[in-house]
Amino acid sequence: ELVSLEIRPEPGLGLPIDDGQPLGVVEATADGVSLGEAPLLAAASVSRDDPGEEQDPWWLRALEAVGRAFARVVRAIFG
């Protein structure tokens, strides 16, 4: 079975984001059957970039956040 994840973001989501803020819902399905869904919460606060502050590129930070969210969803659904 192939498990698929669908992320449905909150409408109007934008920066800044507070730690623990709801970002949307993620649903796991297998062969078209819903296995469950869970709220997607921010793991950390995110503010607008400060031009004087050195950070990783936005796309790398976003990819890392999605990876952490995926891991949490899998743990929440499958234990």
Image (spheres, grey):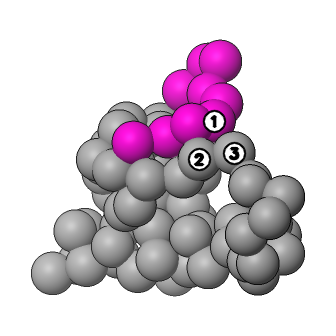
Can I make out residue 60 in this image? no
Instruction: Between label 1 and label 2, give the one nearer the viewer.
Output: 2
Question: x%, y% of residue 8?
Answer: 58, 37
Spatial CA distance of label 1 from label 3 is 6 Å
User: In which image quadrant can residue 75 be found?
Assistant: bottom left
The residue carrying mark 2 is: 47
| Magenta region | 8-18
| Disc 1 + disc 3, Cβ < 8 Å | yes
The residue carrying mark 3 is: 48
The residue at 54%/52% (across/down) is 46
| Disc 2 + disc 3, Cβ < 8 Å | yes
The reply to whether the magenta stretch includes residue 56 is no
Question: Considering the numbered disc 3 on the image, is that residue within a helix, a strand or a loop?
Answer: loop
| Disc 1 + disc 2, Cβ < 8 Å | yes
The residue at 55%/61% (across/down) is 5
* Kind of residue at badge 3: Arg
Spatial CA distance of label 1 from label 2 is 6 Å
- Pick whichever of labels 1 and 2 is earlier in the sequence: 1
